Image: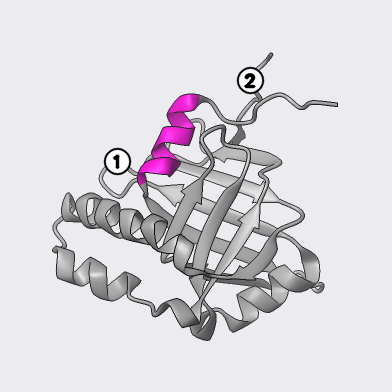
Amino acid sequence: MTHPALLDPDRIAMVAKGVSAIVASRNAGLRPSVMRAVGSHIRADGGRVTVFLRRSQSVQLLRDIESTGQIAVVFSEPSTHRTLQLKAPQAQVRPAVPDDLPQLQAYLRSMQNEVGQVGYGPAYVAAMLAAPLADLVAVEFTPTAAFDQTPGPRAGQPVEPLQP
């Protein structure tokens, strides 16, 4: 059975260009955990998303993802506050590998541009996102729910899947 596409091309493009990404999960007792991603990637059809985290800074978050599978990621454009939240019940964690470097470098360049629009220079962003490959993990998931989180009257509203 095929499912309708969850994200329209405009939302996929926003995530694909590389915008701020905050990753969250929770433990079995519903206690939340959260961390800034140092990179992200979305497949061209929006069907698979990868976020990159520093293992050393994300111990509890990774523990929660690995034990519950639950993940929520908020993608936001710093200059406009346009925001999209994606959720999934079955995220998987894997080590980052050298083949991930082009995605991480593209994300860094994009974030330097995005955050530069609100007054922070490239060195600040590079320091914020700095991470040796050996400390990175990739968290991959298929989004099953999406929400418009842009401040305003639609904040919190589900994104309706595209009809075939």
Q: Which residue is drawn at 60% across and 83% down?
A: 59
56 shown above or below 16: below
In the rendering, which numbered label is found on residue 162? 2
- Residue 17 in which image quadrant: top left
Q: According to the image, label 1 marks what residue?
A: 80
Instruction: State the image quarter where residue 10 is shown.
Output: top left
Give the extent of the magenta segment. Answer: 9-17
Query: What secondary structure prevails in the magenta region?
Result: helix
Residue sitting at x 74%, y 71%: 66
Amino acid type, residue under disc 2 in the picture: Leu
| Quarter of the rendering occupied by the N terminus | top right
What kind of residue is marked 1?
A: Thr
Q: Which element is circle 2 on?
A: loop
Q: Earlier in the sequence, mark 2 or mark 1?
A: 1
Q: Does the magenta stretch include residue 11?
A: yes
Secondary structure beneath dot 1 equals: loop
Using a 10 Å C-alpha cutoff, classify the residue at mark 2 as few (fewer than 14 neighbours), some (14 to 19) or many (20 or more).
few
86 or 47, nearer to the observer? 47
Q: Count of labels shown?
A: 2
Q: Position of residue 15 (x, y in %)?
A: 44, 43
Viewer-nearest residue: 99 or 62: 99
Question: Residue at horizontal 32%, vertical 60%?
Answer: 105
Relative to 79, residue 60 above or below: below
The extreme top residue here reads: 164
Residue farthest along the right direction in this orientation: 1
Tag on residue 151? Answer: none
Residue 47: x percent and y percent? 63, 38
Along the line of sight, which residue is nearer the eye, 45 or 91? 45
x, y (%) of residue 56?
Answer: 51, 86
User: Residue at the location (39% across, 80% down)?
Assistant: 132
Nearer to us of marks 2 and 1 is 2
